[in-house]
């Protein structure tokens, strides 16, 4: 089904409980890259650190995500426009750190975000940037999602915990969201000249096969700089290696959508 024909958006969750693997960078640039490719995209920052919010240079004037989760405001009230054209954001704020307690008090606490997102129309994609944990916020994002993308740093320690995350995805699929599936794994901070990077990438591809994107994201100074300027890499330095790599990933992501 083409994106324009969907009556509700496809929801894609970017998750990894390990920090520093390029999760937020992937969420921001997937969302921005989809917008560049003429999709209407909503990025929801589900992380109390609010890195996706600052990475898009957003100022939190509208009610943020916490208000929607607490039932104080509809999710739509927190949507703010961003750049490039076609990209919108539901920002996070520091008070989201209390979301675990707030959610735990609500009926069916794992499904609160899904109920909010189910009311959205007018978007082709919703991208969820998760916190680096497997707590209730991440479970909410997984339950709300149609699919999951796992950014994976090509280093040994990054593999630790991957099996736990995949088991969490399976549990959510079995108990809360039968439609959920693993969209793919994206190798980040990758340099094939480094033997360990190459070995980890080989092992991951051998184990997960076609679930691993052909596109890889290199270490790139301009990519590291772009969040501090509040701009996705395509606007900060569209000719950089980081921008080229993320656009290759976005194109590959879009090509896979025909399968679902």
Image (tube, rainbow, N blue to C red):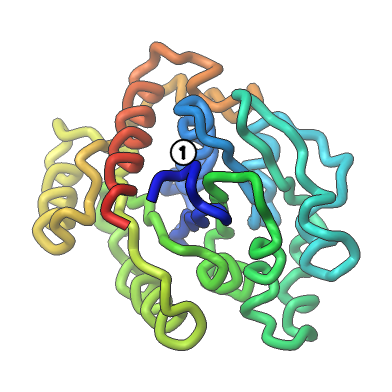
Q: In this orientation, which residue lies closer to the viewer: 10 or 197? A: 10
Q: Determine whether 199 is above or below 142 in the image.
A: above
The x, y position of residue 219, in whole percent, is 35, 30
- Dot 1: within a 10 Å radius of its alpha carbon, few (fewer than 14), some, or many (20 or more) residues? many
**Residue 200 placement (x, y as % from top left):** 17, 52
Position of 34 relative to 196 (above/below): above
User: Does residue 245 appear in this view?
Assistant: yes
- Percent x, y of residue 36: 49, 25
Which residue matches tag 1?
30
Viewer-nearest residue: 157 or 132? 132
**Quadrant in which residue 117 is drawn:** bottom right
Any part of residue 224 in sight: no
Query: Residue visible at 26% across and 47% down?
Result: 154
Residue 150, position as x, y percentages in the image: 37, 56
In this view, 239 is above or below 103: above
Which is nearer the eye, 155 or 188? 188
Q: From the viewer's perspective, tell me whether residue 77 is left or right of residue 237.
A: right
Q: Which residue is depicted at the point 58% across and 59% down?
A: 131
Under circle 1, the secondary element is: helix
């Amino acid at each position: 089904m083409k994106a324009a024909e969907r009556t509700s958006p496809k929801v894609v969750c970017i998750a990894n409980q390990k920090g520093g693997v390029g999760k937020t960078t992937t969420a921001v640039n997937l969302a921005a890259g989809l917008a560049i490719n003429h999709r209407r995209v909503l990025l929801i920052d589900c992380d109390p650190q609010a890195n996706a919010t600052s990475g898009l240079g957003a100022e939190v004037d509208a009610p943020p995500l916490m208000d929607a989760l607490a039932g104080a405001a509809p999710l739509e009230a927190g949507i703010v426009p961003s750049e490039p054209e076609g990209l919108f954001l539901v920002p996070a704020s520091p008070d989201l750190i209390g979301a675990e307690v707030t959610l735990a008090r609500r009926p069916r606490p794992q499904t609160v975000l899904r109920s909010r997102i189910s009311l959205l129309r007018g978007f082709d994609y919703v991208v969820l940037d998760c916190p680096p944990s497997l707590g209730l916020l991440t479970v909410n994002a997984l339950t709300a999602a149609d699919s999951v993308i796992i950014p994976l740093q090509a280093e040994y320690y990054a593999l630790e915990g991957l099996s736990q995350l995949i088991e969490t995805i399976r549990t959510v699929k079995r108990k809360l969201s039968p439609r959920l599936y693993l969209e793919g794994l994206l190798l980040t901070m990758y340099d094939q000249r480094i033997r360990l990077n190459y070995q980890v990438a080989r092992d991951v591809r051998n184990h997960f096969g076609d679930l691993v994107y052909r596109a890889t994201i290199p270490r790139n100074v301009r990519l590291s700089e772009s969040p501090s300027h509040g701009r996705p890499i395509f606007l900060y330095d569209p000719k950089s290696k980081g921008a080229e790599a993320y656009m290759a990933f976005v194109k590959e992501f879009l090509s896979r959508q025909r399968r679902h």
